[in-house]
Image: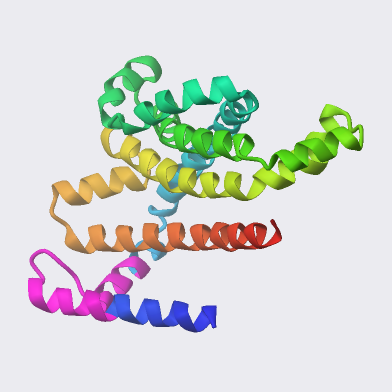
């Protein structure tokens, strides 16, 4: 059933894409077939893969940092009712700040290159992961906590057997949101402060108004993001069904 729904969704997107191409024209758009051909040409070019590896390495590092710091902040604050109530509005306010305004500071601190991309990607993912983790810990059913007390579990045993399984579904939801935002942040970092990577290639294509490259790069990024997000969504649904 889900596979059929996915195929229907893909078909609808392709039809809408083709209709939009017919409406807009080739000056500002490319058809699905042309985009796929351009993407195949990019993938066959040996000069393209170093940029892919650069972007994936920067994203992987940024995402790992965002998850580690985000979960640490969220779990620590969520364990205290007072701390979570005070911190949540602050985190929401930080989340609403346009991250682009922080990019000059990132460049001054880290310079142009890999560290700046990683830092800029990580700051996009830390706050949403923190907020979801905070709420996941804070909203754990008190019955679970009392069960741990009745069973006389140690704090570590209670966390491992009760708290983490109860909070995990919402934490995974936060990680899914953090994944998308960290990817966006990493690409933005490459667009404005890097000499390599997919974001850098995308900025070059935009500067030259190379629609073939713009559409091909966008397609590849969308396929990657949709694939990983689909896997995380499947894990999210499975964990929520178990709760």
Nearer to me, 66 or 41: 66
Which residue lies most toward the right here?
152
Asked if the stretch drawn in magenta spans residue 32, the answer is yes
* Residue at 24 percent of width and 57 percent of height: 214
Give x and y (percent) for residue 47. Answer: 38, 52
Nearer to me, 118 or 66: 66
Give x and y (percent) for residue 54. Answer: 45, 42
Image-quadrant location for residue 185: top left
Nearer to me, 129 or 230: 129
Relative horizontal placement of residue 115, taking residue 21 as reference (left or right):
right
Give x and y (percent) for residue 48. Answer: 38, 54
Q: Quadrant of the C terminus?
A: bottom right
Q: Is residue 154 above or below residue 45?
A: above
Q: Quadrant of the N terminus?
A: bottom right
Asked if the stretch drawn in magenta spans residue 57, the answer is no
- In this picture, which residue range is highlighted in magenta? 15-40
Q: Is residue 138 above or below residue 166?
A: above
Q: Is residue 166 visible?
A: yes
Q: Is residue 64 visible?
A: no
- What is the magenta segment's predominant secondary structure? helix
Nearer to me, 98 or 201: 98
Which residue lies most toward the top here?
109
Give x and y (percent) for residue 157. Answer: 86, 35
Q: Which coloring applies here?
A: rainbow
Q: Is residue 136 above or below residue 43?
A: above
Q: How many marks?
A: 0
* Residue at 41 percent of width and 26 percent of height: 89
* Residue at 23 percent of width and 74 percent of height: 17
């Amino acid at each position: 059933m889900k596979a059929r729904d996915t195929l229907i969704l893909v078909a609808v997107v392709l039809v809408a894409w083709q209709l939009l191409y017919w409406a807009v024209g080739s000056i500002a758009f490319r058809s699905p077939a042309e985009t796929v051909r351009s993407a195949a040409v990019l993938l066959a070019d040996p000069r393209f893969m170093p940029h892919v590896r650069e972007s994936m390495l920067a994203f992987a590092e940024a995402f790992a940092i965002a998850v580690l710091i985000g979960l640490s902040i969220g779990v620590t604050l969520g364990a205290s009712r007072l701390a979570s109530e005070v911190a949540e509005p602050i985190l929401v306010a930080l989340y609403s700040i346009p991250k682009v305004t922080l990019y000059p500071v990132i460049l001054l601190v880290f310079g142009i290159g890999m560290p700046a991309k990683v830092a800029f990607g990580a700051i996009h993912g830390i706050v949403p992961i923190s907020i979801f983790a905070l709420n996941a810990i804070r909203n754990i059913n008190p019955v679970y906590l009392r069960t741990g007390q009745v069973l006389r579990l140690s704090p570590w045993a209670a966390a491992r057997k009760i708290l983490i399984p109860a909070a995990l579904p919402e934490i995974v939801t936060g990680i899914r949101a953090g994944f998308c935002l960290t990817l966006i942040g990493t690409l933005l970092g490459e667009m404005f402060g890097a000499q390599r990577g997919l974001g850098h290639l995308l900025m070059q294509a935009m500067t030259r108004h190379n629609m073939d490259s713009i559409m091909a790069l966008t397609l590849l990024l969308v396929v990657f993001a949709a694939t990983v997000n689909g896997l995380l969504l499947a894990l999210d649904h499975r964990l929520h069904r178990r709760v």
